Amino acid sequence: MRSNKMRDTIRKSLLSTAAMFAVATIASIGPVAADKDDHGTNPNKLKTATPIKHLVVIFNENRSFDHYFGTYPNALNPEGEPRFEPAKDTPTDINNLLSNPSLLTNNPNLNPGNGVGASNPFRLDRTQANTRSQNHAYTPEQLASDGGKMDLFPAWTGAGTAGGAGAFGTTAQVMGIFDGNTVTAFWNYAQNYAMSDNMWGDTFGPSTPGLLNTAPKPFILPTRLMSADAAFRGPRARFLRPRIGRGNSC
């Protein structure tokens, strides 16, 4: 049986996900499975090349990497908001908007074809934490990609919040990004665990294909799509959407 400590850790992690993390649970945390497996082997007595015995993958659903980590590890830190200061040894070679600065100042989604939603990426503050769900259907995401130009996301996938100030109230909201002053817990996860800044899905559309992308091999072979969808209900699994358009693409 799993220890209460590990069970609580997994439950909290699944309820509060940021982006895709691989969390290696080392042996020093203590045994997780004390009983023998189907082959009569106690997994805690297996010899391993490293102390790592268990791998926990946490992933987010319907949000792009840059929506949460576009400027990681640099937060604006305005007065009155929780500060985020990265550790001195925090990697800086992260594939995000900071390493692609032209996408911050001259983004393809400034395309006039987006109408009033034409926008560069912009910071969402703590008063804007409750964003609208952006369109992540198969056809709109393809149209937003615009043959690889990645310049029509506000037009096809964006949705604004009624009464919201500025771009937040228009389809440009799809280009909004948070930093460590609002998604502080997520950025703290990134400080302590491995983070996938280059995860790409193999298709557009809903969550089920993305969930299948996280599997190292086809561990489930559904005969109907519905059976695959049902198989992933339980602990609410969350998936990191493809980083389409370098904004909140879904």
Image: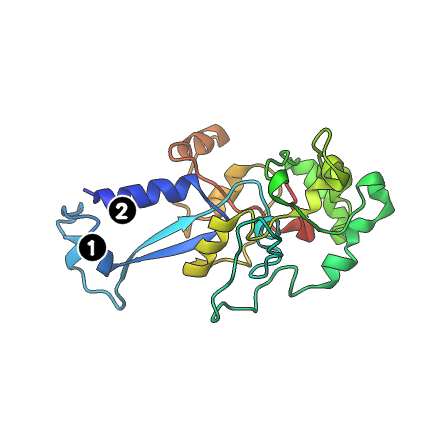
Q: Height in image: 178 above or below 106?
A: above
Instruction: Give me the residue at 81% from left, 50% from top.
Output: 110
Q: Nearer the viewer, residue 204 or 135?
A: 135
Q: CA distance from mark 2 to mark 1?
A: 9 Å
Instruction: Give me the residue at 63% from left, 45% from top.
Output: 125
Residue bearing mark 2 = 6
Q: Determine which quarter of the picture holds residue 96.
A: bottom right
Quick one: label 2 or label 1, which is nearer the N terminus?
2
How packed mark 2 is, by other alpha carbons closer than 10 Å (few <14, some 14-19, many 20 or more), is: some
Q: Is residue 204 left or right of residue 166?
A: left
Query: Residue 17, percent across and down?
Result: 46, 45
Farthest bottom residue? Answer: 89
Instruction: Give me the residue at 61% from left, 52% from top.
Output: 79
Q: Is residue 19 visible?
A: no
Query: Residue 229, percent across and down?
Result: 47, 32
Q: Nearer the viewer, residue 39 or 104?
A: 104
Query: Residue 241, percent across and down?
Result: 57, 46
Question: What amino acid type should be assigned to the residue bearing mark 2?
Answer: Met
